[in-house]
Image (spheres, grey):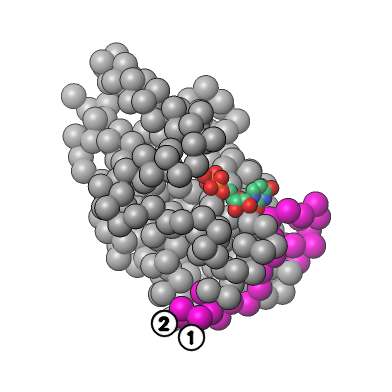
Amino acid sequence: MMEDYKNLPCPLQVMSLQVTPFVSYRHACACVEGLIDSGQKAYSVAVNPEKIYKANNDRELADLINSAQVFICDGIGAALAVRVLYGRAVRRITGIALFFELVKKASEKGWRVYLLGASPESNKGAYDTLLKSYPGLSIVGRHDGYFKNSGKVIEDINRSEADILFVAMGSPKQEQWLSENRDAIQASFCMGVGGTFDVVSSKVKWAPAICRKTGTEWLYRLFSEPKRWRRQLALPKFVWFLLKYKLAGNGKL
Ligand code: UDP
């Protein structure tokens, strides 16, 4: 992909991954708008402590995440890393909240949206809810995230002439799929959104506002889905790892 991405802030290196320092949701949306208006192709991944930690020991994972162009600072741990390494505050931009902002913008601007991922019920539930909540929204296609033939799905996406493709297949599956298939997909902007369709379809509850404000969504998730506790261990491991990394003289002192 030979693009210059002048309309995007320069990403900051956070260990083996990167973070795009957006200053607000409005800023992030304006950048996506710039990409779509100029017909540039880009895709976005959410960067969180779990991914930073894993990618540090997994070159292949780091490369496939770094093949994106937009790296949202998804969660307090990633924001903390930027603060520790650069002494700089960066706005936390969660994938799900940015998803809602972009959907709202899409309904105002007439962007065509495609929903890929989640179970067939959850995908349909998300579609129904979005159409009800954003009457002007143009959802031009959708497909669940359990398919074997990517070629057929990509054909459907391209036929729909979508401007934005949301991919909700969890990590690292969605990053893998996007990095392999981004070039074949004509939509201007693609974004990995993890479990977002499960929340939109009400299969899973969104973290309460207090957790969203304080950046403690991980704590809510730990209590509401205790079987994910292993994944949540990534945060304390990450903080320890970050401190060691900084003490070893990395980052801006
Ligand atoms: N999923 C999918 N295809 C797969 C595996 C998972 O579409 O092959 C969906 C799954 O149904 C769920 C989402 O991906 O809706 C994963 O959600 P999770 O909250 O685990 O996302 P993460 O925290 O990994 O971003």
Q: Nearer the viewer, residue 126 or 77?
A: 126
Could you tell me which quadrant the C terminus lies in?
A: top left
- Dot 2 falls on a residue whose secondary structure is helix
Question: Magenta stretch?
Answer: 130-155
Horizontal side of residue 212 vs 226, given as left or right: left
Q: Nearer the viewer, residue 67 or 135?
A: 135
* Residue projecting furthest to the top: 248
Q: Amino acid at mark 2?
A: Glu
Q: Position of residue 171 (x, y in %)?
A: 57, 43
- From the viewer's perspective, is residue 236 above or below residue 101? above
- Dot 1 falls on a residue whose secondary structure is loop
- From the viewer's perspective, is residue 53 above or below residue 186? above
Q: Quadrant of residue 220?
A: top left
- From the viewer's perspective, is residue 225 above or below residue 194? above
On the image, numbered disc 1 is attached to which residue? 136
Q: Amino acid at mark 1?
A: Gly
